[in-house]
Image (cartoon, rainbow, N blue to C red):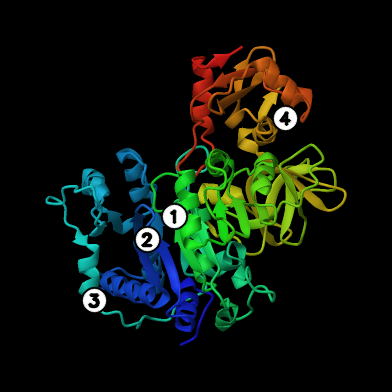
Amino acid sequence: MTKHFNLADLFEMVSDVVPRREALVCGEHRATYAQLESRANRLANYLISRGIKKGQHVGLYLYNCNEYIEAMLACFKIRAVPININYRYVDSELAYIFDNADLVACVAHREFLPHIKAIQADFPALRTLIHVEDESLADTADIESSAYEKALSECSDIRSFPERADDDLFILYTGGTTGMPKGVMWPQKALFFAAMGGGGWFHPDGAIDLPEEISSRVTEAAIVGMALAPLMHGACWWYACIQLLAGNTLILNPSHSLLGEQVWSIVEKEKVNALTIVGDAMASPLLEALINSTNRWDLSSIFSIGSGGAVFSESKQEMFREYFPNVFITNSFGSSESGNMGFDGGGRKGSGLGNVAQSEFMSVINYDDSGLAKHASPGEEGIFSRSGHIPIGYYNDKEKTAKTILDIEGKNWLLLGDEARLEDDGTITVFGRGSNCINSGGEKIFPEEVEQALKINPDIYDCLVVGIPDDRYGNLVTAVVAPKPGRSLDLNSLQLHVRAHIAGYKVPRQLHLVEDVPRTPSGKPDYPKALQLALSNEFVIS
């Protein structure tokens, strides 16, 4: 049977090379590659017995657990599509996902069954529920759901599935910072090369040319990597695939929140080599734990700390370097729609979030006087864009797809949300999300850049920047700040500190001190909630 750039094909070939190597650890639950493969096959065969077919969608409504990875692989094996579900949704948001994603089945922790029961009558196509036992003791009497382990015990672990394809879909639902989630439709081959390095992250020969070459990319000794985000977030989900397709060991955060002390204890116990975070929201509690518990843990196994999916400020990177002077620290650009867009090469020169190189697959797109999309010339600004291995659109949203993927000079380009400038030296300076841009007195101000400057202040734990309406300037730059415990801040001292790092018109005109800066479970900024806090004037500091 022909092998493809299909995640199930690739995983099976890796599993056959290192069956006894440890693949997955989440708390006390551990699995070798052979065990993971066997259990995924059993679940795949159970899904087949329930009538799940190629292209149908299966929800994954789970906390981090080994079953999440098993269910993902099971779906890929039978050419079904796993759908990530945010476990913090209220019933109305959950109903939106079940409807928009056209779910026919769902694998959920027992805790979530009452939420599914509350909306299930509206979704007659949802005929298969499988629940993973937990400590919740949620009542399952009135809802038809199969216990996960019982379902596996009833089915064979024989690998006998039909041939797959490069373009079998991987759909990632992404919430961004505004609006309801959208399902980004990735052909698996495109995702493998755009977001997972094409099998080349850990090998000097780089990406593979043929699917069968994935076996040659298996590392001689497993690199132990820990992803701190929830699996429902693309940064963790994709990293999990990167680790497993390299024959490495994946460590998941078993907690429902991020506790710095707990993470470092796991790093010490499992001898973690590589740690991946989602920006400053995850960096801050990790650094606080190190500050408060100097020399408590043996962390000598770590050689890499990487971030993607949110701003990883220079100030936080420098703090990590103080504790890990010989560790390789990376800050990657990318999103659910783009995959990895490269790594910040530094050289910010006081503006922007970082720089990446322009290439035939990365560019800045803007519009000419007639409204036609074109490539920016040096010195011009526009939208950070990608071509080549890109998604095919948004599930059930043709309008957004048409606005995001454009044919320019006979080639499809994906317009990302970040505004950028093409520099004279051929690099691209990325500023931040245009949708969050603040217009104050006619000047464009990107919140992420102001946040970077704020975080240099040693008294600030976390912050977001928003624009509030103003009769004179249109919008005032406003900082919503969580100070470090025991620290005090006032507007004047904050302005003096920030003015040394950014232009005067970008300096915050209001300061609101809060206990916690609003963020999503994955660590992404929740700008709408931050704006609500600022508009309430409940936390304003003069």
Nearer to us of marks 3 and 4 is 3
Q: Which residue is mark 4?
A: 444
Question: What's the residue at 47%, 62% (across, down)?
Answer: 270
Circles 1, 2 touching at the beta carbon (< 8 Å): yes
Task: Verify CB contact (< 8 Å) between mark 1 and mark 3.
Answer: no
Name the outermost residue toward the left.
141
State which quarter of the image contains the N terminus. Answer: bottom left
Residue 395 locus on image (x, y percent): 46, 54
User: Which residue is nearer to you in this view: 351 or 170?
Assistant: 351
Q: Which mark is residue 231?
A: 1
Q: Which residue is mark 3?
A: 155
Q: Which residue is mark 2?
A: 68
Q: In the rendered view, does 259 fall on the left or right side of 363?
A: left
Percent position of residue 182, x then y: 47, 48
Q: Name the residue type under label 2.
A: Tyr
Q: Amino acid at mark 4?
A: Lys
| 206, above or below 295, in the image | below
Q: CA distance from mark 4 to mark 1?
A: 35 Å
The reply, left or right, for residue 492 in relation to residue 482 is right
Residue 361 makes an appearance in the image? yes
Quarter of the image where one finds residue 466: top right
SS type, badge 2: helix
